[in-house]
Image: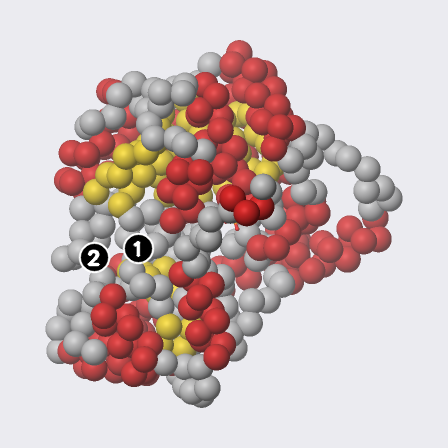
């Protein structure tokens, strides 16, 4: 059996990690991997999470199973965090999943279960795992235009034109905020146009929200997903706690199914639990419990929000510093998009050759499509990056 395995293409980000590790240059800069890093290059455990972990260690008396959909208390705090009061709680079915990736996988399986003919429309580009999981599941997907390589913003006319091809029952996958890998996002007027199109066509939105709190703020980053959930009859939402709670390895995420018709919720909830049962049975609990403890304790919650806000503002400052430095060096505003982008990533929009040159000649590591992790920078490395960008002729 094993001899039937085919070698898989190397993961481009993991190869980059290896190359970076083996690079002896002291001034090398890692803008590759998608985890938050502070100015010293560390990915810290957030203060409130650490405190919650201590409390949990003292208070938890059993490691017995919880429930197929996870702890209902976790669902409550997450529905509140993501959806606020945009929809009635009794219209939302929710199940904990292993990370945001688990939620995405379960959402795709739910789509295939409900409508094997559904096509999933994905932005071009999108997070590569979206496409990879769809391929693995043998599901049909269609790319819609998204990134304008001239302006490095959203090609909104192209996006809407491509989305006009959706049919009732198709699914449109949207990044709730902080688009990965481009950093370019729709404004709320554009989101409303997408919502109108969904309502005209009967296509169903699936919102992937993995960076709430990394863009413009917790509520601001959730404004689009709240607009969508409250404006269409049915929606799917896959949320990750990996980034905004800094609990990557705990695998904490949630899938929500929102239905305008509250009487649908019971069946939705049963289906989410069924899908968990088939794939991994009970979802991981540790990270979910930490999130629940933090969110239900006013002091911890306030401290978490304050630390997350520092992370967000830190990344925004780096964006502005980089855009400013590039304006100074190039004498033009053509890098202004870096300050407009939101979240951890920006697509620089260069050729793969320039990405190679940045790595080989300047020790600057970014993904081949020129995605940079802004959190990989600090005040000292920004001028180094800016100079190198100009040097390779971007
Ligand atoms: N969705 C997007 C767009 C992401 O970038 C990520 C992580 O990189 C995820 C979902 C899922 O993250 P995780 O499975 O680590 O929670």
Badge 1 element: loop
The residue at the point 66 percent across, 48 percent down is 287
Badge 1: few (under 14), some or many (20 or more) residues near its Cα, within 10 Å? many
Position of 197 compared to 330: left or right? right
Check the image and report above or below for 39 versus 297: below
Position of 174 compared to 55: left or right? left
Q: Is mark 2 within 8 Å of ligand 1?
A: no
User: CA gap, disc 2 to disc 1?
Assistant: 8 Å
Give coordinates of residue 155: x percent, y percent. Answer: 18, 46
Give coordinates of residue 364: x percent, y percent. Answer: 35, 76
Badge 2: few (under 14), some or many (20 or more) residues near its Cα, within 10 Å? many
The answer to whether any part of residue 111 appears in the image is yes
- CB-based contact (under 8 Å), mark 2 and mark 1: yes
Query: Coloured how?
Result: secondary structure
The residue at the point 86 percent across, 44 percent down is 61
Which residue was labeled with disc 2? Answer: 152
Give coordinates of residue 308: x percent, y percent. Answer: 52, 59
Q: Which mark is residue 41?
A: none
The residue at the point 55 percent across, 62 percent down is 307
The residue at the point 69 percent across, 34 percent down is 282
Position of 129 compared to 190: left or right? right
Which residue was labeled with disc 1? Answer: 182
The answer to whether any part of residue 385 appears in the image is no
Give coordinates of residue 125: x percent, y percent. Answer: 29, 48
Location of residue 188 (image quadrant): top left
Q: Quadrant of the C terminus?
A: bottom left
């Amino acid at each position: 059996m094993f001899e039937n395995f085919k070698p898989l293409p190397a993961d481009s980000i993991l190869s980059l990690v290896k190359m970076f590790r083996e690079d002896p240059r002291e001034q090398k800069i890692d803008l590759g991997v998608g985890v938050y890093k502070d100015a010293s290059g560390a990915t810290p455990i957030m203060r409130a999470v650490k405190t919650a972990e201590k409390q949990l260690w003292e208070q938890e008396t059993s490691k017995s199973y919880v429930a197929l959909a996870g702890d209902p208390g976790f669902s409550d705090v997450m529905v509140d965090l993501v959806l606020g009061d945009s929809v009635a709680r009794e219209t939302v079915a929710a199940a904990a999943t292993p990370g945001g990736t688990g939620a995405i996988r379960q959402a795709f399986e739910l789509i295939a279960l409900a409508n094997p003919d559904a096509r999933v429309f994905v932005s071009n580009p999108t997070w590569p795992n979206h496409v990879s999981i769809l391929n693995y599941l043998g599901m049909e997907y269609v790319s819609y235009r998204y990134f304008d390589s001239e302006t490095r913003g959203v090609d909104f006319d192209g996006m809407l034109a491509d989305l006009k091809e959706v049919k009732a029952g198709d699914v449109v996958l949207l990044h709730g905020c902080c688009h990965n890998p481009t950093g370019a996002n729709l404004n709320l007027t554009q989101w409303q146009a997408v919502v109108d199109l969904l309502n005209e066509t009967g296509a169903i939105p699936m919102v992937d929200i993995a960076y709430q709190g990394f863009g413009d703020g917790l509520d601001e980053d959730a404004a689009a997903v709240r607009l969508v959930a409250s404006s269409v009859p049915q929606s799917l939402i896959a949320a990750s706690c990996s980034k905004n709670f800094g609990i990557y390895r705990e695998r904490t995420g949630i899938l929500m199914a929102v239905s305008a018709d509250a009487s649908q919720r019971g069946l939705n909830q049963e289906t989410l639990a069924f899908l968990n049962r088939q794939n991994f049975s009970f979802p991981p609990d540790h990270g979910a419990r930490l999130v629940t403890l933090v969110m239900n304790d006013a002091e911890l919650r306030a401290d978490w929000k304050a630390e997350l806000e520092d992370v967000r503002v830190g990344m925004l400052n780096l964006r502005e510093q980089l855009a400013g430095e590039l304006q100074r060096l190039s004498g033009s505003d053509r890098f202004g998009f870096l300050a407009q982008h939101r979240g951890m990533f920006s697509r620089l929009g260069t050729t793969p050759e320039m990405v190679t040159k940045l790595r080989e000649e300047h020790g600057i590591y970014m993904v081949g499509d020129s995605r940079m992790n802004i959190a990989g920078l600090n005040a000292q490395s920004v001028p180094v990056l800016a100079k190198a960008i100009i040097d390779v002729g971007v």
